Image (cartoon, rainbow, N blue to C red):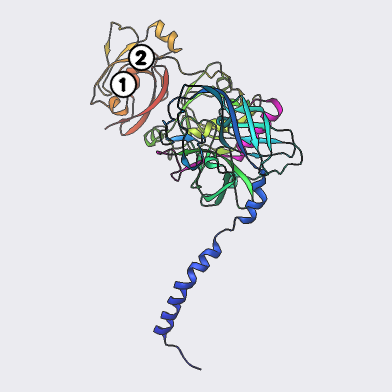
Amino acid sequence: MKKISLPRFSLFFACWLLFAYPVLAVDRLPDFTELVEQSAPAVVNISTVRGQVQRQAPLAPPGDFPDLFQHFFGQPPFGGQPFAQPGPQRQRPSRQSLGSGFIVSQDGYIVTNHHVIEGAQEILVRLSDRREYQAELIGSDPATDLALLKIEAEDLPVVRFGDSENLRVGSWVLAIGSPFGFDHSVTAGIVSAIGRSLPNETYVPFIQTDVAINPGNSGGPLFNLQGEVVGVNSQIYTRSGGFMGLSFAIPVQVVEQVVAQLRDDGRVVRGWLGVVIQNIDVHLAQSFGLDRPRGALIAQVDPRSPAAAGGLQAGDIVLAVEGRGIEVSSDLPPAVGRIRPGEAGQFRVLRDGAEIELRIQVGERPDDSQGQRSAGRADPKSGLVLIEDRLGLTLSPLSDAQRQRWNLEAGLEVTQIDSSGLAAQAGVRRGDILVSLAGQSITSLEVYQQLVEQLPAGRAVPLRLVRQGSPLFVAIYISE
């Protein structure tokens, strides 16, 4: 038998890998063809008629979006734009392809985004076989950007729902939709992150992907490799108005809950606590005795709210709801929102360094959410009292008008502040109202002085304040 020397064999093996690796790599990539063939017929194109519009100057190009997080409003094919018509101005109905949707029942229920159909006088649905139907709006939910439509048809192809809670970062996912009016376009990518919170989005823990999503994909389904819907494509992060590698989908677990309520009642009700929350940074975590930053810090409790009735207090840190951990403050609203109004949920709370369990019956979120009170400065007062400069503050008692305006039982107003003092370093500002220090209520100047004197050196302590009507916690590090 002829023997091959080791150097020659190594060279042979290296050459084999060089040519074989691309083939092996391709074999490991998923094949989406069967998934698309089975699922695409249930994906629809949605356009709307929005009444009379006046044709004037050309519309702004797609890049002129005011916000980095954009809903996918449709544009004409090939990236073109409408042009002004010569001659006198005239009005005519505007029909525009705005987005996508998918069929969830054989008798014609369709899911899409709220922003796709918002303000529409007529909603038109085009199926994959080019049949068109006028759709009825069953209901929509702006808080989750979801809407449910109904068309009069039977034996329609439908999608299957999967489990978005079992998604893992790095998993393959696929989108089908109508970007720029190109029906049933297919794009694929991976899950980039889960449970992502976005600005002004309270009740949706988004799925972030790198799937190519563009204007017109809005409301379309996001599939896993089993051909199950795991999300609804809703937003993109963009500086140009087009895809930049950051896409966001509403998890199907949220979709199922919202769709069920829209179908039964035409509206969505969700659990409500009546609290103001804030995130916990490293310094606040240390001041409350946490091993690391986690949980949702309760900055304020509405005295007439379900939270107050259930025993929740300002300064509590919610660590878990119904057994699910709360890592950041944005995890709390969707966790509470999953509890039906009138039902009780189990809350694990950190209070005064000890974990306790509270069972709180949540209420229904008011339709007109109670925003924070309007800002305003109090009238100047006399009788300022200089407090020991350990924190660097000059404080004065609150007037009856201030207490009533901000609904406060205790507190002192910061009238002057040493810019190099400990309080200023922690972020306290002139005009803030100090409500509690190290978990103790500040009921008077004397009480405040005693609390300051008793503060332990070499550690951070929480300070609760009210800034122009908004409650806030800051951590003050007490130097040696």
Please identify the quarter of the rendering in which residue 292 is found.
top left
**Any magenta on residue 129?**
no
> x, y percentage for residue 30?
57, 58
Sequence-earlier tag: 2 or 1: 2
**Is residue 312 positioned above or below 61 on the image?**
above
**Any magenta on residue 262?**
yes
Residue at x-position 52% and y-position 23%: 53
According to the picture, the residue beneath numbered tag 2 turns out to be 412
**Is residue 144 positioned above or below 387 on the image?**
below
> x, y percentage for residue 462?
38, 28
Residue at x-position 47% and y-position 21%: 88
**Quadrant, the C terminus:** top left
Q: Is mark 2 on a helix, strand or loop?
A: strand
Amino acid type, callout 2: Leu
Q: What element carries label 1?
A: loop
Dot label at residue 429: 1
Residue 311 seen in the figure: no
**Is residue 273 positioned above or below 286 on the image?**
above
Residue at x-position 30% and y-position 25%: 423
Region of the chain picked out in magenta, as a range? 238-267
Amino acid type, callout 1: Arg
Q: Nearer the viewer, residue 475 or 179?
A: 179
Dot label at residue 363: none
> x, y percentage for residue 393?
28, 19
| Circle 1 crowding by C-alpha within 10 Å: few under 14, some 14–19, many from 20 | some
